[in-house]
Image (cartoon, helix red, strand yellow):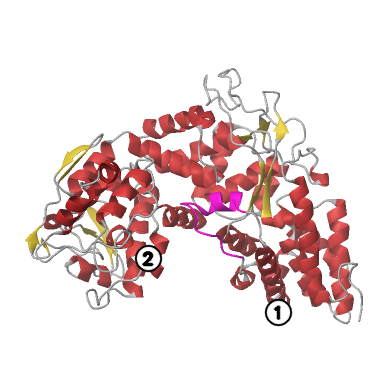
């Protein structure tokens, strides 16, 4: 049996050994400073990258002058682990869809709205490392079994049985995976692994490819996005290097590692001025992947992805099937895509849109005629008091119990996710069981009798429940209803800071016009993009974004593009 390394005598164990060692090294390096030399694993700047202007000096029309007089302090730099979606998307860009289908990265715990925040803060566990190993080996096997897509990027693979081709694979695939050129030391290490695999497989070229691919995908240079930048001379601020900025752009707008063209642009210094970055961002937003990335973002933020596992009382709601749940999710995403990409209109339109998209299942739920096409734009039923995505079955289904509505959950969503209002969690020991109104008692009557008794309960519930009562004309799966427990429904409300409303459609109009709503849209995008909750240090940078969003009449594409040239995007603070 041939020895592949000092770590292990067995080839199948090699990738895990390499990963364990390299991740240990990554832990030591996390927070370290790059040296600016891409051939040594640095940030990829060449020393003359144009500095981001945060002083308000607009004498250089090519430079970044969007910061005005703001004092912008970005979040700290460091290393950010790929989310599962970014991992799979990157494998597809690097090795093709066959390889991506074999990818199985470890899942992230659902600790907040965004996977990026969790990935940025949760350390790897031994189980995570094992799953990265098994995923990388499965991908390597898939590439070994179907090398056509690899050959499209590295033509010498087609000839086979030429170990000299491994060097070209390292250069091309390593650059895509590491998001920068491979260093000499990395090249030597990877070639050693490929050649050892070649010998292990009885001088089989594709066995070497399998272990080479597996090693690349277990490197911290693939699993982590390095964002340490170079000193700007202003406090602890550091400007992202060319390759670092390319990576941040691609993961933000497309959800995957930079492709060859974007890496070439970084190498050529074509991502240094506002105009260059805006032009690149706009081109990226024209791709189908940009729609997928936006959908993924709102899947998380609006918890649409929860629909797949949402259970309902089968006796009460026999029409609630996995197919209907999937249609609910698609309906809301189609509305968002239509506003952002087709109409390019005010994003605030998602709150009070008088139309939606339906298939046969949704048309039946709405009580309207079936569409002529698989998916069709139709007016929302006027007599049901619907307006915008908050009256979509998706929202109403996710934020309800299996057999009864949850005004508290629905109201909490409005406060926290749409207005960015912090609501204190309930005290320990609070009964979280679903409500149980008496015969002839509406849910609202029961909740008001329970939550208004104790002042400690009334304070918080007074910010949530009245908002949730606005949706009481809709069932736990979003169907329209006129009675609750045989009694008339009162969907009116009055909430401090928002005012009074008669139902869901009036609340939707209030939310559209409340200045906190677009500001919260900006903050949520920032949080997801950087995997970091904003603090006072980021207030000025966010104010620039909020103003740009307002000035564009809330054009979401403008918001995304302006984020890419904002100092919060292009700078990092000292790694910590």
Position of 523 compared to 398: left or right? Answer: right
Name the one closer to the observer, 26 or 530.
Answer: 26
Residue in the picture at 39% in, 39% down:
520
Q: Which residue is mark 2?
A: 307
Position of 254 compared to 180: left or right? Answer: left
- Is residue 9 placed above or below 387 in the rendered structure? below
Residue in the picture at 58% in, 45% down:
249
Query: Residue 128: image x %, image y %?
Result: 65, 64
Stretch of the chain drawn in magenta = 106-122
Name the one closer to the observer, 17 or 353.
Answer: 17
- Is residue 201 placed above or below 79 in the rendered structure? below
For residue 112: magenta?
yes
At label 1, counting other C-alpha atoms closer than 10 Å, the crowd grade (few under 14, some 14-19, many 20 or more) is some
- The quadrant of the image that shows the C terminus is top right
Query: Residue 545: image x %, image y %?
Result: 46, 33
Q: Can I make out residue 163 in this image?
A: no
For residue 407: magenta?
no
Q: Which residue is mark 1?
A: 145
The nearer-to-camera label among 1 and 2 is: 2
Give the mark nearer the N terminus: 1 vs 2.
1
Label 1 – label 2 distance at C-alpha: 36 Å
């Amino acid at each position: 049996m041939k020895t592949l390394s000092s770590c292990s005598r067995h080839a199948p164990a090699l990738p895990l050994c390499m990963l364990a060692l390299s991740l240990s090294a990554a832990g030591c390096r996390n927070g370290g400073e790059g040296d600016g030399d891409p051939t040594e694993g640095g940030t990829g700047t060449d020393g003359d990258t144009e500095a981001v202007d945060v002083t308000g000096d607009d004498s250089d029309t090519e430079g970044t002058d969007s910061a005005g007089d703001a004092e912008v302090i970005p979040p700290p730099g460091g290393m950010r682990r790929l989310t599962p979606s970014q991992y799979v998307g990157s494998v597809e860009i690097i090795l093709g869809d066959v390889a991506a289908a074999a990818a199985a990265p470890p899942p992230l715990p659902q600790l907040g709205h965004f996977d990026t925040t969790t990935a940025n803060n949760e350390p790897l566990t031994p189980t995570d490392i094992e799953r990265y190993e098994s995923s990388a080996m499965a991908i390597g096997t898939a590439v070994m079994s179907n090398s056509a897509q690899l050959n499209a990027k590295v033509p010498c693979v087609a000839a086979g049985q030429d170990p000299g081709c491994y060097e070209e694979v390292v250069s091309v695939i390593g650059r895509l995976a590491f998001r920068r050129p491979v260093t000499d030391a990395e090249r030597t290490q990877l070639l050693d692994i490929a050649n050892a695999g070649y010998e292990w497989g009885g001088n089989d070229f594709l066995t070497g490819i399998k272990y080479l691919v597996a090693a690349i995908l277990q490197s911290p240079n693939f699993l982590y996005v390095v964002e340490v930048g170079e000193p700007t001379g202003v406090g602890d601020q550091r400007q992202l290097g060319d390759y670092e900025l390319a990576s941040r752009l691609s993961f933000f707008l497309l959800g995957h590692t930079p492709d060859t063209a974007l890496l070439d642009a970084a190498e050529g210094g074509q991502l240094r001025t506002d105009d260059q970055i805006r032009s690149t961002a706009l081109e990226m937003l024209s791709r189908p992947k940009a729609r997928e990335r936006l959908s993924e973002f709102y899947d998380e933020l609006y918890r649409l992805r929860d629909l797949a596992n949402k259970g309902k009382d089968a006796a009460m709601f026999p029409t609630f099937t996995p197919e209907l749940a999937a249609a609910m999710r698609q309906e809301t995403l189609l509305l968002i895509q239509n506003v952002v990409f087709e109409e390019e209109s005010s994003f605030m339109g998602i709150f009070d849109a008088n139309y939606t998209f339906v298939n046969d299942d949704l048309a039946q739920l709405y009580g309207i005629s079936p569409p002529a096409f698989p998916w069709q734009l139709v007016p929302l039923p006027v007599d049901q008091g619907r307006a915008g995505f908050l009256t979509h079955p998706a929202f109403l289904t996710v934020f309800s119990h299996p057999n009864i509505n949850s005004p508290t959950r629905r109201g909490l969503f409005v406060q926290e996710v749409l207005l960015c209002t912090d609501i204190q969690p309930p005290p320990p020991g609070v009964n979280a069981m679903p409500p149980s109104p008496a015969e002839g008692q509406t849910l609202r009557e029961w909740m008001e009798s329970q939550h208004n008794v104790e002042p400690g309960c009334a304070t918080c519930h007074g910010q949530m429940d009245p908002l949730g009562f606005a949706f009481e004309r809709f069932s736990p799966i979003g169907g329209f209803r006129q009675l609750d427990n045989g009694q008339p429904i009162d969907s009116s409300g009055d909430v401090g800071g928002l005012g009074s409303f008669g139902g869901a459609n009036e609340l939707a109009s209030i939310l559209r016009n409340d200045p906190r709503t677009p500001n919260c849209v900006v903050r949520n995008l920032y949080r997801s993009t950087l995997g970091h909750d904003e603090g006072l240090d980021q207030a000025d940078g966010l104010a620039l974004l909020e103003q740009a969003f307002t000035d564009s009449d809330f054009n979401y594409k403008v918001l995304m593009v302006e984020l890419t040239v904002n100092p919060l995007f292009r700078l990092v603070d000292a790694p910590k």
